[in-house]
Amino acid sequence: MIISVTSLKGGVGKSAFTQHLAATLSLVGRVLVVDLDAQADATVLLGLGGNYGDLLADEAELDPTIAELMDWSLSDSDNELYDKKSFSDVVKKISPYLDVIPSDLDLGEINYSLNRFPLKPRKMKDGSTEPAELHILREVFDQVKNDYDYIVIDCPPNIETCNVSALFAS
């Protein structure tokens, strides 16, 4: 089951609810938390701590996020917008039954990328095509859905493209 936790208003306890829901669900099954919010509150609440101090360094490098798992193939070239990483390089184990794909400040640009760059449309089973933006998160979850009983997504407080993709995946 894929659950998107979303609200158009920030500060309503969405990330705390995500953390509590994930912890409770981990008592009955394997859970993956996906933090889509650049504020990374769910990431911090799950004990991973923000990596924002690195921003002061000249060569700041933040942890990989869901963006490095998505298929960013462009329709007008063979290039991808983000370096692709393996799932094991991105996911962090919190407990035996709870994993998280962390967020960081870089994730704030994801909606810009989804709206600005021409992504390769996805081919459906019937031969038709649909916008990549709709399927980009579901494709990631399809690869790991047999490893988890629940995938809980902490969405940012907006209704931009990334949230629509999360809701579509749910």
Image: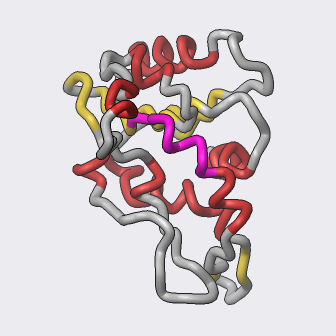
Q: Let me know if residue 122 appears in the view.
A: no
The magenta segment is 102-110
Q: What is the magenta segment's predominant secondary structure? A: helix
Q: Is residue 2 left or right of residue 14?
A: left
Q: Quadrant of residue 119?
A: bottom right
Q: Residue at x 45, y 48 (%)?
A: 66
Q: Does 117 lie within the magenta span?
A: no
Q: Is residue 57 visible?
A: yes
113 left or right of 9 in image? left
Q: Residue drawn 44% across and 64% down? A: 82
Of residues 141 and 36, which is closer to you in this image? Answer: 36
Tag count? 0
Q: How is the image coloured?
A: secondary structure
The residue lying at 47 percent from left, 37 percent from top is 34
Queried whether the magenta region covers residue 106, the answer comes back as: yes
Asked where in the image residue 65 lies, by quadrant, the reply is top left
